[in-house]
Image (cartoon, rainbow, N blue to C red):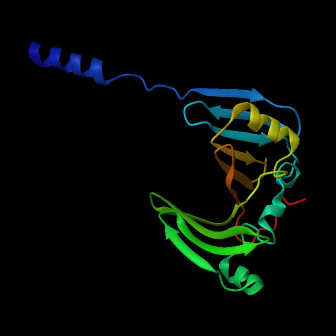
């Protein structure tokens, strides 16, 4: 019995450690931005906007052309024709379009958690330049922190996430709008 207890204590001591907290940097920001959280391990940044500030005030939503989140493929096809491409992965199905030389994808995203399934229609843009894409205050923050990804969130539901490769935006995603909801945060 003593041997079992000793072995149990040794195993628990070596394997029962407290979880290591994620290294974070957090800071309040000047309006129109509210606050920032940056994961130091992945360089993923989350930026909250002041209440009442629309996404379109800090991100140039024109990069998405006439495409909006929360709009089903049926409506997109009616307004813009059949997609030029289609691909699928574990997260959803993506329908390719082009607008003003920018590749656009209208995405039907799905997520399963236990017995519940969550779905949304999002829009992705793959800009050829990120010049003028963000407000001066957001550009300054991005230049200071050099994130790999930035998520910009309003006090409402719509959000933008942008991925960075080689110091520039490689993809920007507009999401968080329920299907049929007109609150897209465009000014």
Quadrant occupied by the C terminus: bottom right
> Which residue is pictured at 51% across the width and 26% down the height?
21
> Which residue is pictured at 62% across the width and 42% down the height?
148
Where residue 38 sits in the image (x, y, percent)? 65, 33
Where residue 186 sits in the image (x, y, percent)? 86, 60
- Would residue 161 be found to the left or right of residue 57 on screen? left
Where residue 139 sits in the image (x, y, percent)? 81, 40
Vertical position of residue 42 compared to residue 9: above or below: below
4, 64: nearer the viewer = 64
Vertical position of residue 114 compared to residue 147: above or below: below
Where residue 143 sits in the image (x, y, percent)? 76, 35
Q: Is residue 102 visible?
A: yes
The quadrant where residue 85 appears:
bottom right
Q: Is residue 184 visible?
A: no
> Which residue is pictured at 68% across the width and 43% down the height?
167
Vertical position of residue 142 compared to residue 8: above or below: below
23, 169: nearer the viewer = 169
**Number of on-image labels:** 0
- Would residue 2 be found to the left or right of residue 105 on screen? left
> Which residue is pictured at 53% across the width and 72% down the height?
87
- Would residue 19 be found to the left or right of residue 85 on screen? left
């Amino acid at each position: 019995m003593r041997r079992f207890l000793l072995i149990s204590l040794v195993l628990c001591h070596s394997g029962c450690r407290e979880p290591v907290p994620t290294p974070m940097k957090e800071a309040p920001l000047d309006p129109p931005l509210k606050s920032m959280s940056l994961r130091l391990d992945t360089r993923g940044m989350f930026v909250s906007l002041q209440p009442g500030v629309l996404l379109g005030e800090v991100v140039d939503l024109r990069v998405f052309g006439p495409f909006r989140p929360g709009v089903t493929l049926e409506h997109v096809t009616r307004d813009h024709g059949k997609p030029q491409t289609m691909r699928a992965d574990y997260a959803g199905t993506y329908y390719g379009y082009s607008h003003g030389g920018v590749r656009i994808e209208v995405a039907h995203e799905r997520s399963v958690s236990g017995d519940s399934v969550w779905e949304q229609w999002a829009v992705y843009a793959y800009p050829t330049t990120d010049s003028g894409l963000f407000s001066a205050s957001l550009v300054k923050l991005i230049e200071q922190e050099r994130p790999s990804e930035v998520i910009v969130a309003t006090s409402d539901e719509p959000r933008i996430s942008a991925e960075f490769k080689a110091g520039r935006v490689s993809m920007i995603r507009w999401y968080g709008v329920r299907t049929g909801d007109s609150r897209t945060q465009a000014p």
